Amino acid sequence: MKPLRIALTKGRLEKDTVELFEKIGYNCEQVHNKGRKLILPVGNGEIEVVLAKAADVITYVENGVCDLGVVGKDTILENGTSFYELLDLGFGKCKFALACKKGYDFYSGYKEKTIATKYPNVTRAFFEEKGMDVRVIKIEGSVELAPLVGLADGIVDIVETGSTLKANNLEVIEWVTDISARLIANIASLKLRKQEIEQLQKKMQEEISKN
């Protein structure tokens, strides 16, 4: 039988997921010694891990080349719809926040506000809910720069500690939503490999519940 294939977001989420796999009894030695390999066996080969960038994890799961994926809720909110979200893994925690220059009264005045962000879909949805018209500018690099150079009135970005905001004289005005890592599944895989997926999900769930 072919292995259950799981796409992992490279970096911290990969490390945390591998740690979870080890806690539920899988040997992850090959992942630790991966070198430049991007597809690696876990356990006795019943699971195969695919290492990818966050947005690509969703693409691989949606297109059925991976049965499961581990990705941040931020990426799900921005990019994905055609899959099942099975489990909140409880790690990779942070928040989306609306921030602006210290002392700036963001909600005053009638002028349309400009928001810089790496997450235009999340940003639009947030302001639509408030019934506010905003102009959204997509930024690839350091979003904090946009209000400082006068490109935007505020930013919507992921905040972990808030130290980058403080260092750049910015402050959080409002929290948008909480984020953590999620286990997602391909829709067809969930039907065809229901038992295997549910067994793995159950083991992960039990381990998470201990904490």
Image: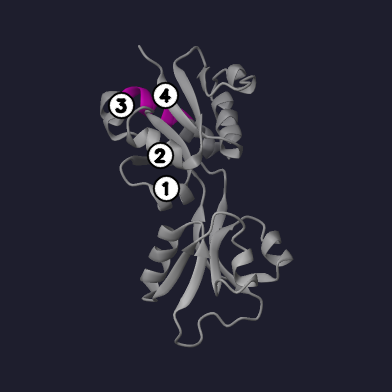
Q: Which residue position holds label 1?
A: 76
Q: Is residue 148 above or below residue 22?
A: below
Tell whether 66 sits left or right of 210: left
> Tag 2: residue type?
Ile
> Tag 4: residue type?
Arg
Image x and y of residue 42, in percent? 52, 18
State the residue at coordinates (70%, 67%). Answer: 168
Please tell me which of labels 2 and 4 falls first in the chain.
4
How far apart in space, not on screen, are marks 2 and 4 (Cα)?
Answer: 13 Å
Please tell me which of labels 3 and 2 falls first in the chain.
2
Please tell me which of labels 4 and 3 falls first in the chain.
4
Give the magenta-colored segment's residue range: 195-203
Q: From the image, give the main secondary structure of the stretch colored magenta.
A: helix
Would you call the spot at circle 4 few (<14 residues within 10 Å), some (14-19), or many (20 or more)? many
Please tell me which of labels 2 and 1 falls first in the chain.
2
> Tag 3: residue type?
Lys
Q: Nearer the viewer, mark 2 or mark 4?
A: 2
How far apart in space, not on screen, are marks 4 and 3 (Cα)?
Answer: 13 Å
Residue 194 tag number: 3
How far apart in space, not on screen, are marks 3 and 1 (Cα)?
Answer: 22 Å
* Callouts 4 and 3 close, C-beta under 8 Å: no
Q: Secondary structure at mark 1?
A: helix
> Tag 1: residue type?
Ile
Total marks shown come to 4
